[in-house]
Amino acid sequence: MRHFATAPSPFIDMADQGAAFRLRSAILMLGNQCADAEESVEMFDEEQQLLRSEPKDMPSVFKRARRGQMHARSLVFAVDNFIKMIEAMIKDQAAPAAALRTTLDSFIAAVPGATALRNSLHHIEDRARRIGSGGRTIAQTGGAPAGFSVPPGTQVMFIGSNISNDVIFCTAGNGQTVELEVSDNTVRLMAQTLQEVVDAFKWKSPSTPLRIPS
């Protein structure tokens, strides 16, 4: 893995050993989401490169495009899992909730559409029928990301995995278009956030540093 966080010790310094083990496990799971995200971006990039370089027969183009969409979706789910795991940690009474909340808020601000994007990808059966959050009908829709042309005033529902350059996007439950950059920038941001989570805890006396993900 090219992107990772480092703890000064393998163990959290906490009187409640059960809580220490529980929170350490949660941090390791965050590392797993970073690893999944990095692999997803690498495989997405590989498919995009092949899509540009291989002969442009329709079966090959369709196959490469579908595979790229699959890897982009994997990134979305890794980012959403990452967010949900930190939210769960914040609710743990033994965790430094204030510091984790600040860290999470900064991360969400940098990827504001991630959870809404994940929800729409997971509920295409609703979006295909213009059903949004809370079962409400989506009457108005938002625009498209940069590089994707839509005629002015056109109401378009982007259902499922839509790709424009290195962005995956779709229509969210509120009718707005949400997106996530499928690139190293997103993975780097996850790793930086993970490091902030690690730094929010007190670790036992420095010994062998713990690399997350390993």
Image: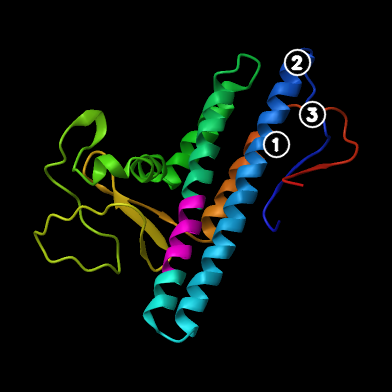
Regarding residue 200, the answer to whether it shows in the image is: no
Q: Which residue is mark 1?
A: 28
Q: CA distance from mark 1 to mark 2?
A: 15 Å
- Is residue 70 shown in magenta? yes
Q: Residue at x 36, y 56 (%)?
A: 161
Extreme-front residue of the structure: 59
Q: Which residue is mark 3?
A: 203
**Residue 74 shown left or right of residue 140 in the figure:** right
Query: Residues at badges 1 and 3 in contact (C-beta under 8 Å)?
Result: no
Q: Label 2 sits on what residue type?
A: Gly
- Is residue 204 shown in magenta? no
Extreme-right residue of the structure: 207
Q: Which residues are magenta?
A: 65-74
Label ID, residue 18? 2
Mark 2 is surrounded, within 10 Å at the Cα level, by few (under 14), some (14 to 19) or many (20 or more) other residues, namely few
Residue 95 falls in image quadrant:
top right
- SS for dot 1: helix
Regarding residue 92, the answer to whether it shows in the image is: yes
- SS for dot 3: loop
The quadrant of the rendering that contains the N terminus is bottom right
Q: Label 3 sits on what residue type?
A: Trp
